[in-house]
Image (cartoon, rainbow, N blue to C red):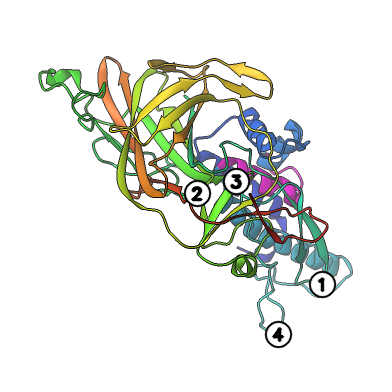
Amino acid sequence: MSGQDDLREDPGQDLARWLGNLRNSNGAPTYQVIIDRIRANDPTSSLSMSTLTNAFNGRGFPRYETVVAIARALAGRQAAEEADKEYARARNRRDELERRKRHSAQGGPPVDTASTEPADGKKAQELPAVTVSDATAADLDLTVASARGGVRRRLTLWPIAALTAAAFAAITVVVLADPFSPGHATPASHAGGRASTKDSTADTVGDTSQTSPAAADPGSSSPGADPTAAANDVWTGRSPIAVQAQTVQDVCGSAYFDGTPQQYRAAQTIIPAPPRNAVVLGEAVQVTVQGRTQQSVILTGMRVDVTSSKPAPTHGIVVSYGQCGGGVEVRHFDLDLSRTPPTYTAKPADNFGKITPAVEFPYKISLDDPEVFELTPAKGCGKDKDCTYTVTLQWVADGKTGTTVLDNHGQGFRNLNPDHLPVYRQDPMSADGPTLRPQT
């Protein structure tokens, strides 16, 4: 690319392309859905539809907080961290282009803008990456130092919505019917195809999910359980649904840490977020289930399976952290992992004073009827138990049956219940600072 072509390139457009790719690789949610997620993460957010539209269309250079909030709403913590890096690169490039334009306007010699390296051959420094955690407390301020002239700025991080009781791991199942954009997200595929886990935003977005017409146990409502079923009653070919998943943390949560309170504080990099080697007890998993076409798909049920169980740790501490925030409207299910097999029960939910009635399967998803399901282990595997479990969605499309297994990249979703460990609480707003206090 020539220097003049590079001058005409707009770093704001680069950010817009990055955000657009992130959106497409995460199911292409509507702008309103993104706004709703941002406000669920931060109830005080005033980000408007016009600001969101401008960011996705590259109109002007967006604010840092806007880019991070959008990325986090689309794909969680890891996407927010990547947004921090992308924004730093774009801002450095914007500053360099503006400097070169000023130099050219002042009658200086032509400057090759195809490279942003200074004359001494050293690479221009980028802003240091800031780790953005979904467990960060409300209105947590970080100061980010720029390598360009020592400029400092304030960064506000937003809380993730409080989805579960502090001591329970939960699964939030987001059911949308918008099809994936072709060539972007890597959804769970049929007959054993797998999509990767966690918060990755490239072609590894989503949960490790198996879609198989014969994945159910005998006696369940899942297809494949009836050996007399005709072969033509089971779905074959590409699955009619695509599944993605990402882990999120409850801002009003608890964490297990294998160490002392002093070691916990020393290991923290962002307060009140727990250290990276802590096990978050209030972690949730957001699962997006989408139809690939206009055809309706009936979710006929689901199954929960405990895949491993062992005694909980007998040493270490449990720390409650953060400030509770608001959540999104959900359909609520209580899981009982102590039973064999585990069971689930539909429950009404109180969403900001609005009672959402209990929902029983079967349930139809369509383009005009998105739903959010929250699965909470009201009863875990048992006191002082450390177990993992999976969730199997059962569905019917065009008269054919199938299942989709959500297994967190083959690791299962963890439910840890350390019942006999000392419990501490960390309040970042305490006048004495973020010390750990015993909790009775």
Which label sits on residue 120? 4
Q: Earlier in the sequence, mark 1 or mark 3?
A: 1
Label 1 and label 2: CA atoms lie apart by: 32 Å
> Of label 4 and label 1, which has the lower sequence position?
4
Query: Mark 3 or mark 2, which has the lower sequence index?
Result: 2
- Image spot of residue 107 (x, y percent): 87, 71
Q: Secondary structure at mark 4?
A: loop
Mark 2 lies on residue = 199
Q: Which residue is tagged 1?
A: 150
Which range of residues does the magenta coloring cover?
Answer: 57-74
Pointer 1 or 2: first along the chain: 1
Identify the residue at horizontal 15%, vertical 19% (top origin): 232
Q: Which mark is residue 253?
A: 3
Question: Disc 2 residue type?
Answer: Asp
> The N terminus appears in which quarter of the rendering?
bottom right
Report x, y in % for residue 419: 48, 49
Instruction: Specify the label residue 207 is tagged with.
Output: none
Mark 3: few/some/many CA within 10 Å (<14, 14-19, 20+): many
The rendered magenta stretch, by its main secondary structure, is classed as: helix
Amino acid type, mark 1: Gly
User: Residue 43's x, y, as percent?
Assistant: 73, 35
Looking at the rendered structure, the kind of residue marked 4 is: Asp
Q: What amino acid is at disc 3?
A: Gly
Is residue 211 visible in this depiction of the protein? yes
In the picture shown, does residue 119 fall above or below 272?
below
